[in-house]
Image (spheres, helix red, strand yellow):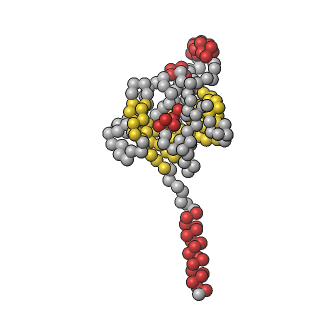
Amino acid sequence: MNKTLKFISLSLIGIFILTSFGLQNEPKILFHKIRFTASSVKLEKWNIKDTIGTEFVMETIDDYGRTKELRFYNWKHQLDWAGSGFYGGPIIKYDYEKNKIIETFFSSDTEIANDFSTSEVPFRFIYYLNSQNNIERTQMKYKMDFKWTKESLEKTIKHLEFYKQYESEETDLDHVFGYTYAFAKMNGIEPKTK
């Protein structure tokens, strides 16, 4: 009897060790059928199994049930997007903080999308949420690349002077932009403005 208890105890300890160390959850990945148009991306069907010959978005979901990343692919399985001058990018990544969703658009794994001098759209939205997970305000961040010469600096200053009149942070977006293509969203919650 004593040997049996010792064997069971050691077995339980072994199982505990095996399940506690080195085993991490694989991220959950979903695929959704989309269609690219000249000016947008249309969602056509949630949770498809087969992506052969199909335009699709690949959604990665974190351990908390939230959308962590969206990747948009054309029918050849190449990263793609609707074009310059539109919100978004082929890769959209999400970071979550207390009462805040940070949505960043990328043109590749390492390059931020949407240079302001060519597309005039933000590369990042920061959504500030209230305690009911409604969007209270949205902050937009812009990126601008330019060569550091006297001529290019003057051109950039002129460009920015023109946009000074539009310095308002107002946006007509009433939801998290990329959540249009995300099934999980914020663990099933889709924050909106009230």
Q: Is residue 107 in view?
A: no
Outermost residue, left side: 53
Outermost residue, bottom side: 1
> Looking at this view, is 57 or 116 the one in front?
57
The location of residue 37, given as percent across then percent down, is: 39, 27
> Looking at this view, is 88 or 150 the one in front?
88
Q: Is residue 13 above or below residue 20?
A: below
Q: Is residue 59 above or below residue 175?
A: below
Q: Which residue: 60% across, 37% down?
A: 101
The location of residue 119, given as percent across then percent down, is: 50, 22
Q: Which residue: 35% across, 45% down?
A: 50
Q: Quadrant of the C terminus?
A: top right
The location of residue 157, given as percent across then percent down, is: 61, 14
The location of residue 18, given as percent across then percent down, is: 55, 66
Q: Quadrant of residue 10?
A: bottom right
> Looking at this view, is 159 or 28 the one in front?
28
Left or right placement of residue 131 versus residue 10 in this view: right
Q: Is residue 139 in view?
A: yes
Figure label count: 0
Q: Which residue: 62% across, 36% down?
A: 134
Q: Quadrant of the N terminus?
A: bottom right
Left or right placement of residue 109 versus residue 167 in this view: left
> Looking at this view, is 147 or 12 the one in front?
12
